[in-house]
Amino acid sequence: MPKSLTPRLAALRDEIHGYAKEFGLDFFDTVFEMVSYDEMNMVAAYGGFPTRYPHWRWGMEYEQLAKGYEYGLSKIYELVINNDPCYAYLMESNPEVDQKLVMAHVYGHCDFFKNNFSFRHTNRRMIDDMANHATRVRRWVDKIGVEKVEDFIDRTLSLENLIDQHAPHIRRNPDPQRAEEEAKSNERVEGFKVNREYMRGFINPSEFMDSQRKRAEDEKQQRKRFPERPQRDVLYFLLEHAPLEPWEVDILSILRDEAYYFAPQGQTKIMNEGWASYWHSTIMTRRALRDDEIIDYADHHSGTMGVRPGAINPYKLGIELWRDIEDRWNKGKFGKEWDECDDLRARQAWDKKLGAGREKIFEVRKHYNDITFIDTFLTAEFAQQQKLFVYGFNDKRNSWEILDREFRKVKNKLLTSLTNFGQPIIEVVDGNYENRSELLLAHKHDGQDLKSDYARETLRNLQSLWRRPVNIITRYDGKGALLRYDGQHHSEKKVEL
Amino acid sequence: MTLKIHQDHSRFKQIVRGKIKANLRKYVQKGEMLGKKGKDAISIPIPFIDIPRFKYGHKEQGGVGQGDGEVGQQLGPGAVEPGDGHQAGQGEGDHALEVDVTLEELAQILGEELQLPRIERRQNERIVTQKVKYTGVNTTGPESLRHFKRTFKQALKRQIATGTYDPKMPVIIPTREDRRYRSYKLQELPETNAVIIYMMDVSGSMGDEQKEIVRIESFWLDTWLKHQYKGLESRYIIHDAVAREVDRDTFFHTRESGGTMISSAYKLCRDIIQADYPKSAWNIYPFHFSDGDNWSADDTRQCIEMLRNDILPQVNQFAYGQVESPYGSGQFIKDLREAVGDTNNVALSEIADKDAIYASIKDFLGKGR
């Protein structure tokens, strides 16, 4: 089980801690623990946490990590939890220079967690909560049985990405309005007040009463059209409206909580990994490296920065972008004058000796996420320097190929892939579809079709929670399509959009 | 040391095992894993253990990459990672999960599913063999075991330390002292020996489909027997009117025309056993496949005689698989059944098509001999 640091490593930690502070990093207390490689794989499989609820997918994750390590394909160097205090792990077998690098890297992450706006509402006691979640799920396992609980988790995981990724915070209490509205709909139609009983027929003639009744009925129907506005947080909608058992509600809300906790990490991956890499490299090369460690450091660092042609390495893209911003703000390469200058030579030699780079990157790390970061700071020059391109699949040649190096397209593609995590945007539009308590989702189509076999399987899982037929409106090959699963059969029909 | 995750891990393995079992019949028939056979393990695609979500097909999606290359240039295989790599907390692969299963484990699953008994070993004589195991890195060793990366790194270190490294001309020349070598130990492994002698009719009436069946079936026979014996040897005999011994590849890919004399194969089989595999030290398994068409009743008589007198007394089990073909009369298995069908170390099986492989494996291995 995790051990605390040896005196030697504790001293190194203090040293690195000092450098991090000296450079202006600002973080929660950070606790380092020593783990064996086996434990490291376990913690990594658990998403960084020492304990998670029981489920086979952690085992699958573990299997893949352990295999990757054994085959020498991958090695997890650094793991850090966004928590107060932050927890981070050091692998026992690593050489000292790696430990220093990891510590420096971790302090970068911790600074980012504490200061970036996306994390402002994250739960900083998540270690405790994860452990509580585990206990709660285990308790249900004891009560309900492992098969049923696992099965429910499997089905819910299939819906895990249906949260409002960009919601500033997680909504927890069911809508109080709902109860109120329900009460209102039960009011009886009374007509005008009648003082003398013999006047009733004149004051409230039966046609009038009938029409009043009908109006009330219509209003009620209207109200039954819920949600009033499309709702992105599908899991929340299910929590509120699906006919779930108490244990199912509990587990669903646990999984939703965890999904929200991880969402900001997904939204700031490039920034965050880049930031941590920027700081490990700065701290190591300017302060912490001993001469005899340079080669191992360089070997490790370049390993982290390696790129494959068909993928973006967030460490590499991130660190380069941070450095580019720093450089531009040091030299004053921004603003009207810079934008309007089209003399290439002047642009290359541009240096206003502004020296504002460090300050600028600290500001940026506070107020941006990957989308706004890329949108604001990825320049044509940068894309060219970094040799970025758009690739796609060529059906005729049955292979991936480079499609374009044009800056606009590269940037757009990158932004699209980051929007909503690169996940399709899906909303609940009607919880009483066709007035038959069916569920209707809508996919906001942005040019990419859903993977249809997955969509069908997902509908099947959704149906098992909703217990009535479920539908999703999407688009295939440019035509509107309504996919439906009624509990037994899948069907698909064309719809006009 | 036990880790908390071991529970989740074994649950995962259990699920994988269940999936393999549920699909075993399909795997057995299609032989779809055969092409991917590695040294000790094979990859098996597991349908839908990947949790389904609403998501885009990766092919529609494409993405942004980094590096050299002209527009239109193909990205090499493996260059495109489905999903965005693997990160804790939001790992998301796009591919159907492929699980590595060791042949050992596969054999176990096969055994459980077909309810195969363990083979009774006739010989338990232990023969010891040696195996090389790489254990570390050393400063001396043969050049063939030189560890290039370590050597290079050592040389780089030395040149930097002594100030002879020039960043403008980064030439690294390892000296004798820089060289590093992998070192190894010899491990001794006890073994129980067994040999499979495969025989196949390659005359004109045995078509590609029939051979495919033999190929798939022999893979499973191999797998099971390897599970039972350490140190399994295989020999291959093909025959039409004459028999000859060939290598594995030739065995599966030869096609001859002409007649069929099964006795020629049995004769060769007998000779091989006599020459190389004394009964006292070996567990012996001849497997013969044909479409059941023999040249003459006389030849069949010879076969049966040889079986009775020379082969059956020597072997653990003799197995004959008759693969149905449009040309074969299918007479041979009837003759065998009549003559030696009651003998307990004979296994006979008729394999109508690929679907029948599953049951046929059980015919062959179900006796536990």
Image (spheres, coloured by chain):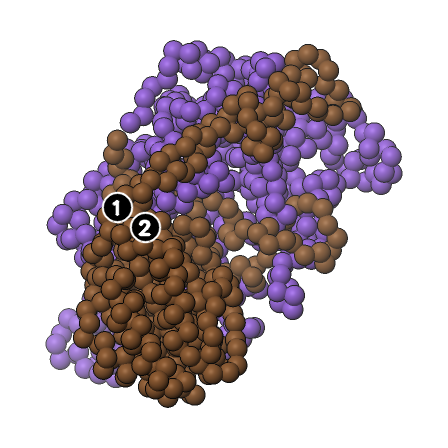
Chain colours: A purple, B brown
Q: Residue at x 66, y 26 (%)?
A: A357
In the shown orientation, is residue B336 left or right of residue B86? left
Q: Residue at x 29, y 48 (%)?
A: B192
Identify the mark nearer the N-term, 1 or 2.
Answer: 1
Q: Position of residue B214 (x, y in %)?
A: 40, 71
Chain on which label 1 sits: B
Name the disc covering residue B125, or none: 1
The kind of secondary structure element at disc 2 is loop
Contact (CB < 8 A) between labels 1 and 2?
Answer: yes
Q: Amino acid at mark 1?
A: Glu
Name the disc covering residue B193, or none: 2
User: Does the image show residue A5?
Assistant: yes
Q: Residue at x 50, y 52 (%)?
A: B83
Q: Position of residue B130 (x, y in %)?
A: 39, 38
Q: Amino acid at mark 2?
A: Asn
Establish if A264 lies above or below A177: above
